Amino acid sequence: MKLNRIDQIAKPRFRIAVHVLVWLAQSGGVLSSAAIAAQVKTHATFLRRVMAQLIRAGIVEAKEGRDGGYYMTRCPKELTLADIYRALPEEREEDRQEELDCGEVGVQLDRHLEALMNQAEQQLIRFLGQYTLADVMDSIGIGQIGPSEELLEIKQENRLL
């Protein structure tokens, strides 16, 4: 599999999250994890991990039951790519490379590189904040529907429970 430039720069789950959210926004309804996984060509277990982060961030909610699945709670025009990026966790331990043992110089180098990467990530977040999910969808000619009135009612009912 060819390594995507997005995966080299952004968090590993960012690309999948954007794909999922574009598809959910386009559908305007509730979609099962199996349907989403088939559409974005990823394993359902991995997808559920990504979805859990999007739920925690209030971008997506889950509806239980026979007709259950996931739906967007925010309008694509109001959801920035920075919002999506910030919703995702840092790398998991198994995603990280082996630790290098380069002595004191290596420790100092790692500290400096970490500081530089933190600054780069902040610039990336500011840049992503300039674009919404709707902007991405418009740029590739995908129509957007966003959450339906029915889904907004479900969201309101869930908050009351």
Image (tube, rainbow, N blue to C red):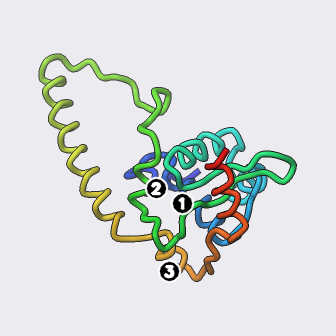
Q: Quadrant location of residue 31? A: bottom right
Gap in angstroms between the C-alphas marked 2 and 1: 7 Å
Q: Quadrant of the C terminus?
A: top right
> Most extreme residue toward the right, as rendered?
66
Q: Secondary structure at mark 2?
A: helix
Report x, y in % for residue 143.
Answer: 62, 80
Camera-near label (2 vs 1) is: 2
Q: Secondary structure at mark 1?
A: helix
- The reply to whether dot 2 and dot 1 touch (C-beta < 8 Å) is yes
Q: Looking at the rendered structure, which numbered label has been put on residue 18?
A: 1
The residue under label 1 is which amino acid type?
A: Val
Q: Looking at the rendered structure, which numbered label has been put on residue 84?
A: 2
- The reply to whether dot 1 and dot 3 touch (C-beta < 8 Å) is no
Looking at the image, is mark 2 or mark 1 earlier in the sequence? 1
- The reply to whether dot 2 and dot 3 touch (C-beta < 8 Å) is no
Write the residue at 70% across / 44% down: 43
Say left or right for 150 vs 140: right
Report x, y in % for residue 125.
Answer: 32, 57
The residue under label 2 is which amino acid type?
A: Ile
Write the residue at 28% across / 61% down: 126
Q: Looking at this view, is 94 or 77 the one in front?
A: 77
Gap in angstroms between the C-alphas marked 1 and 3: 14 Å
Residue under numbered circle 3: 139
Q: Looking at this view, is 1 or 28 the one in front?
A: 28
Say left or right for 160 vs 133: right
Q: Secondary structure at mark 3?
A: helix
Looking at the image, is mark 2 or mark 3 earlier in the sequence? 2
Write the residue at 61% across / 49% down: 159
Q: Quadrant location of residue 106? A: top left
